[in-house]
Image (spheres, grey):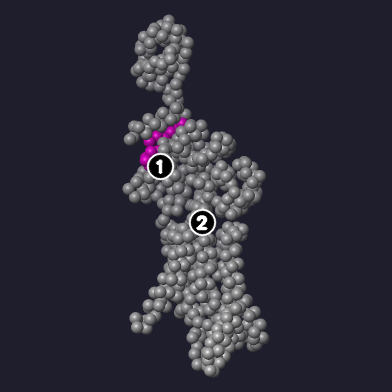
Amino acid sequence: MNTILSTDQLSKSFGKIHAVDRLSFEVKKGQVFGILGPNGSGKTTTLSMLLDLIQPDKGGFYWFGKLPSKESRKRIGSVIESPNFFPYLDAVSNLRIVADIKDKGYDEIPDVLQLSGLYDRRNSKFRTFSFGMRQRLAVASALLGAPEVLILDEPTNGLDPQGIAQIRDLIALVASKGTTILLASHLLDEVEKICTHVLVLSKGRMLFSGEVRELLSVSDAIELSARDMQALKNAVKEIPGFISFTESEGIIHVHFDGPVSPADINSFLYNKGIILSRLSERKRSLEQHFLELLQENT
Amino acid sequence: MMKLLKIEFKKIRTYKVFWILFGLYFIFLAAGILLAEFMINHMVNDVNKRMPIPFPHIAIYYFPDVWQNVAFFASIRYVLIFPAIIMTILITNEFTFKTIKQNIINGMSKAEFLVSKLLIIFLMAILMTSVLTAGAFIIGLAHSGFNDIAFLTKGIPFMAGFFVSILCYMIYAFFTGFLLRNTGLSIAIFTLYSLIIEPVVYFFLRAPFMFRNTIYTYLPVNAVIRLAEYPAIPTLKKLMGLELQSHVSFTACLVPLGYAAIMTLIVFIVIRKKDL
């Protein structure tokens, strides 16, 4: 797999605050790479540096294996912070300026407007657009010229549920075509749903970087219940790796010190003569994981 | 270059504020120039009522004086500030709408962004000088009839002087707008400096009892206006042998050009260093 982006010790301070602190990571071709962090954790600052809007204090980065330039930016489509367009120009005219800058033709403009659901309003001035439409025009502009990389900063911020679903479908569609996506979000559920890889950021520092799947596959609790609850409670204590359990409403949540297989537990208990009426694996949500990571580092 | 102009033209093509202000500028300028003689002579008439020997009427639209006079009226502070304000709006809009960020993100280099604005300033200066030159020529023809070419075009360097004035003054405005980034603040400070602060400083520097020097010629706005500082009034010349300004001095042109060059350089340095 070829590397699309690599950063090396990227740092930026605003006064005494380390907005981004020695950040090194790599994004490979075809990944949907999420940058996850609470508000003010340095996500936008990082993306702004990657797009040459902010000068890093230290460190550097490479796009497509080269030092960043205007040519590398032409291969990237971005939605950063708020949609930035001329209010007195209509959607098409705004997109034509984008196409001119990117050295692309105008023939794709109707397509991206269709894709973002703005085709019917293509001749309306940007000023007259609702917030959701503005956001979608920003996405349309980012998609112009079939970019190799799509950078999205809080793409669903401030949208209604329908708008959020539309944008997510659009991202999924673009990702399915093999476009690399770099997405910053403070919404865990968004990253969980869309991303293949995630980097967790807090106060400008990297707390975790890896596959989302890897992060989610860890299950450390099993929910059990049986007709004979007393026998069950006694038996679970003998399962290897057992730590503790809690009971609520006729179900016990059993915690282990590492990953366990539900099949092993079932056969273990069956051999003890316990017939389970419930056996379910409780995956740690990304949210719990995220909160844990944040707690560990404060 | 053509690409940048194409982009810049798209930005202003349907921008009503730009065209309205530009239109008003031309209307006021034309009205001012065309009514000037009438208004001056109206004042002369008033004065003459109280004078034993009547003062002769003044004619300002004859070749070759018409060049200098048109350049003079177009270089008055209150007129010159119009295109400068238009330029301030064009640059600060890019910050207000954050389109400067978007242009850079989309693949424009920071230098290209500045060049595109400087190109527009240059084109506007050429356009305004052309319109003014054509206007002065028509006015001259209408009043003096056809004459020999050398005499007709004698004062035309005043038009070149006007080009330097308008170009540099718009670059000052561009510089102010770029550094302050805010439309209202930029216009307020630029206007305040041009119309009030500098004239006050100028007054004290020129007051003969203060300093006997030429520092005042280096005041940025004064350096722009000085290129056509006085009108040509043949009556005065005939009566008193008084000629306030005979030609556009080349060395005087170097002062505003120098300021404009320094400001352009600063803008290029700042955009490299400062975060957007």
Name the residue at the front extreme.
B50
Say which quarter of the image contains residue B7: bottom right
Given the image, on which type of amino acid does mark 1 rest? Gly
Image: B215 above or below B25? below
How far apart are the two marked residues, 1 and 2, measured between alpha carbons?
A: 26 Å
Name the residue at the top extreme.
A273
Q: Is residue A61 visible?
A: no
Say which quarter of the image contains residue A97: bottom right
Residue B184, image x, y percentages: 47, 60
Query: Which residue is under mark 2?
Result: B94
Residue A203, image x, y percentages: 37, 40
Residue appearing at x 40%, y 49% in the figure: A56
Q: Is residue B236 visible?
A: yes
Residue A5, image x, y percentages: 46, 43
Residue appearing at x 61%, y 78% in the figure: B34
* Nearest to the observer: residue B12 or residue A179: B12
The circle drawn on residue A40 is 1
Image: B95 above or below B206? above
Question: What secondary structure is found at the residue carrying circle 1?
Answer: loop
Mark 1, Cα crowd under 10 Å, few <14 / some 14-19 / many 20+, is some
Q: Tell me which chain the residue with mark 2 is part of.
A: B
* Nearest to the observer: residue B137 or residue A46: B137
Q: What span is colored magenta in the figure?
A: A201-212
Residue appearing at x 39%, y 31% in the figure: A291
